[in-house]
Image: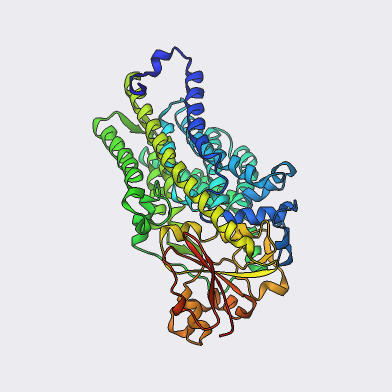
């Protein structure tokens, strides 16, 4: 039995034992590798963009409506990968490899940071496996999930170079930090936050020990500012070249709960059923309980010079708005990274047998969670294939407008799957994310294509067509832009499991086909 195995009985050297544990993690995660269409919400839009950029056959009909320009913007992690010719040979294979890399990279980055903090290796960072299926990952925030662990690697380098002159540290880390900024700006922001918290903590320690020197404190602050300066200047220039109008920042109290459970919960908490919540919440409670017991018994301790870092990044993550400058789901981006930093900053003082029991418990929970994810991924894959088969009968050059009839977890998961359709078919869609990525709508179609589009309700669409759109509290800029060109859309893809009543449809609109979670309508004149 697995529970009867103890690491110390394997007679392996410490490096070999650690390699074995990471090999187990890789094998467990590899269960997800065969799935071609995983339920990572935004992923279909990203893969469509990569197909366009690869210029390799898939998605080339999209080039009638979009152009691809790999320019220096702070959101390029995956696009840089796909800029390599070998990655373009099979974008689906590359994506599946990147998913495996993302899982391992998060755990390994926590492992490396733990070593940088303690100057010792430990298997406690394996606890980061409990965080790999976090909300940003399952939402398909591709560039952020790929880039975020590199912020932890950079922070590990910054700590390791603590004894070096400030000029040397900046010469090594500043170029790497600027590179991280181009991978993803929010991942870069977390790294700067870590460095600022670290340097501030050192200042507090000097103050408490009466070794405080203003010159030293200002030098530390200046070093942090210099790390951020190149990115700040570039971002400022970007905003001048393409100013954003009417951006919003929204703070939500419920967002604090979403932030906590985002460590383990896929997608939106209130849309998940008890079966979807049971195992993730069990894992979260296990993690909290283990940490609580560890601190209560004094067997888990946090490195003194990391206490202020953990508290400060926790406080910032807690106060993050739900939407910041029109960037949605900001509050769920940092919590799993904060938890990773906490794991790296702590260390157990327990026997080998107790360490073995703890690590094995973690690996078992990771295996159970991955098995549960695998089942969900396989179901989602089958649903996407059903949708693709149903749209094969649409004529070449068809225009397809995505809508929803209800708001459920299934609809959220499938909300961007429409983007897969254009990979093998000439079809006009407005749903590909553009403008904040290398993908840009062509001038002749830009009047219809918003930068980021989530399918609105079918009722809203029909109300607008009847001249009743002002009844609904929607942002006009986000929804009216495509609606103003509705004559260009003959077909409607309506996501939702509830059947649509043909009698409720406007005159001239009919059901063309339907599936287990969608209905395709053909419209007439309103």
Q: In the displayed structure, does residue 511 sit left or right of residue 298?
A: right
Give the quadrant of the N terminus: top left
- Where residue 77 appears, x then y in whole percent? 62, 48
Task: Give 73 or 412, whichever is nearer the viewer.
Answer: 412
- Where residue 341 appears, x then y in whole percent? 44, 40
- Where residue 347 appears, x then y in whole percent? 37, 30
- 191 over 119 or under it: above or below: below
- Where residue 405 appears, x then y in whole percent? 44, 69
* Residue at the extreme left of the image, as rendered: 296
Q: Based on the displayed image, in which of its 4 quarters is residue 394 positioned? A: bottom right
Q: In the displayed structure, does residue 34 sit left or right of residue 1?
A: right
Residue drawn 67% across and 65% down? 427
State whether residue 242 appears in this view: yes
- 496 over 163 or under it: above or below: below
Task: Give 367 or 452, whichever is nearer the viewer.
Answer: 367
Residue drawn 56% across and 36% down? 157
Give the quadrant of the C terminus: bottom right
């Amino acid at each position: 039995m697995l529970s009867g195995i103890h690491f110390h009985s394997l007679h392996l050297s410490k490096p070999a034992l650690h390699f074995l544990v990471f090999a187990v993690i890789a094998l467990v995660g590899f269960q997800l590798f065969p799935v071609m269409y995983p339920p990572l919400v935004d992923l279909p839009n990203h893969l469509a963009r990569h197909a366009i950029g690869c210029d390799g056959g898939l998605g080339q009909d999209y080039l009638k409506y979009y152009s691809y320009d790999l320019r220096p913007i702070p959101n390029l992690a995956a696009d840089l990968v796909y800029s390599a010719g070998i990655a373009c040979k099979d974008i689906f294979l590359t994506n599946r490899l990147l998913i495996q890399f993302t899982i391992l990279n998060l755990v390994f980055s926590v492992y490396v940071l733990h070593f940088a903090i303690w100057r010792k290796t430990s298997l406690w960072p394996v606890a980061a496996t409990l965080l790999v299926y976090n909300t940003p990952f399952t939402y398909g925030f591709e560039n952020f999930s790929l880039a975020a662990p590199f912020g932890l690697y950079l922070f590990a380098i910054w700590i390791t170079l603590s004894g070096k002159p400030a000029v040397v540290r900046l010469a090594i880390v500043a170029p790497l930090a600027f590179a991280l900024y181009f991978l993803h700006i929010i991942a870069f922001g977390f790294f700067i936050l870590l460095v600022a918290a670290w340097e501030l903590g050192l200042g507090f320690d000097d103050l408490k020990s009466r070794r405080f020197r203003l010159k030293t404190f200002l030098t530390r602050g200046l070093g942090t500012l210099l790390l951020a300066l190149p990115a700040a200047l570039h971002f400022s220039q970007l905003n001048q070249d393409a100013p954003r109008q009417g951006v919003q920042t929204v703070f939500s109290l419920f967002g604090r709960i979403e932030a906590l459970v985002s460590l383990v919960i896929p997608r939106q908490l209130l849309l998940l059923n008890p079966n979807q919540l049971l195992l993730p919440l069990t894992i979260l409670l296990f993690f909290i309980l283990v940490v609580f017991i560890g601190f209560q018994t004094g067997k888990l301790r946090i490195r003194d010079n990391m206490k202020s870092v953990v508290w400060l990044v926790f406080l910032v993550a807690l106060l993050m708005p739900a939407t910041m400058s029109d960037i949605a789901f900001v509050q769920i981006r940092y919590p799993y990274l904060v938890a990773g930093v906490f794991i790296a900053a702590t260390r157990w003082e327990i026997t080998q047998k107790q360490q073995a029991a703890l690590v094995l418990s973690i690996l078992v929970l990771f295996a159970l969670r991955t098995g549960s994810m695998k089942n969900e991924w396989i179901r989602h894959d089958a649903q996407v294939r059903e949708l693709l088969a149903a749209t094969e009968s649409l004529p070449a050059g068809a225009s397809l407008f995505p809508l929803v009839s209800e708001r459920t977890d299934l609809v959220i998961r499938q909300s961007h799957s429409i983007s897969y359709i254009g990979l093998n078919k000439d079809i006009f869609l407005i749903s590909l994310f553009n403008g904040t990525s290398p993908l840009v709508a062509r001038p002749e179609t830009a009047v219809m294509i918003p930068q980021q589009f989530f399918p609105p309700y079918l009722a809203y669409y029909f109300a607008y067509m009847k001249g009743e759109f002002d009844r609904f509290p929607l942002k006009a800029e986000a929804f009216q832009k495509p609606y103003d060109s509705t004559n260009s859309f003959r077909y409607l893809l309506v996501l939702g499991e509830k059947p649509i009543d043909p009698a409720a449809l406007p005159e001239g609109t009919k059901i063309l086909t339907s599936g287990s979670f969608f209905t395709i309508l053909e419209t007439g004149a309103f």
